[in-house]
Image: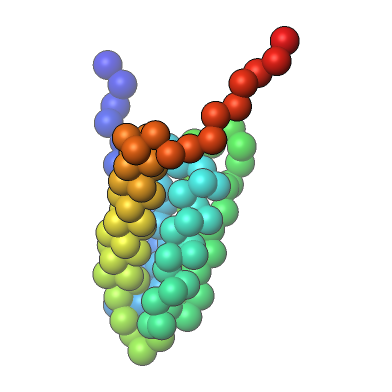
Amino acid sequence: MAEAVEKIKLLKSSADLSAATYQIHDESHTIGNSLRWMLMKNPKVEFCGYSVPHPSENVINVRIQMYDNASSIDALISALEELDKVCEAVEDGYLASLREDKFERWVERT
C-alpha cells in the first residue's frame, strides 16, 4: 500500500513563520499561479512566488514573505479559503447558466 503524503509541507522558514516555503503535493501551475495571485492581494504579504521544481515531480513550492513579522501560514490558509470561495462562485455561475439553458451551442460540422 502506498504511503500517505502530506498535502502541504513546510520546507523552511524563519522562527516566527514570517517567511516560509511550503511544498504542495499533487498540484501544478494551475493552483500555483492562482494561489500566488490570491496571496499578493493581501496587503501584509511582501513577496510571494511559486515554482515547479521539475516536471517529473508532482509538487509546487510556494514562498511567502510577510511584512511586520505576520504569519505566512495564516496568509496561506486565508488565501486558500478565498480561492475556494472564488472557485465555488465560478462553479455556481456555470451550473446556473446550464440550468437556465442560456449558452451558445456550436454544431460540429464533419
Residue 106 visible in rendering: yes
Residue 4 x %, y %: 27, 31
Colour scheme of the picture = rainbow
- Along the horizontal axis of the image, is 102 left or right of 85? right
- Along the horizontal axis of the image, is 49 left or right of 39? right
Q: Is residue 31 above or below residue 68?
A: above
Residue 87 x %, y %: 36, 50
- For this rendering, which residue is in front, 77 or 97? 97
The picture quadrant where one finds residue 85 is bottom left
Question: Which quadrant is the N terminus positioned in?
Answer: top left
The picture quadrant where one finds residue 70 is bottom left
Residue 91 visible in rendering: no
Residue 14 x %, y %: 37, 74
Q: Is residue 69 above or below residue 49?
A: below
The picture quadrant where one finds residue 2 is top left
- Residue at 44% from the left image edge and 58% from the top image edge: 35
Q: Is residue 57 above or below residue 60?
A: above
Query: Which residue of the protein is positioned furthest toward the top in this rendering?
Result: 110
- Residue at 48% from the left image edge and 56% from the top image edge: 34
Residue 8 x %, y %: 33, 49
- Residue at 47% from the left image edge and 72% from the top image edge: 40
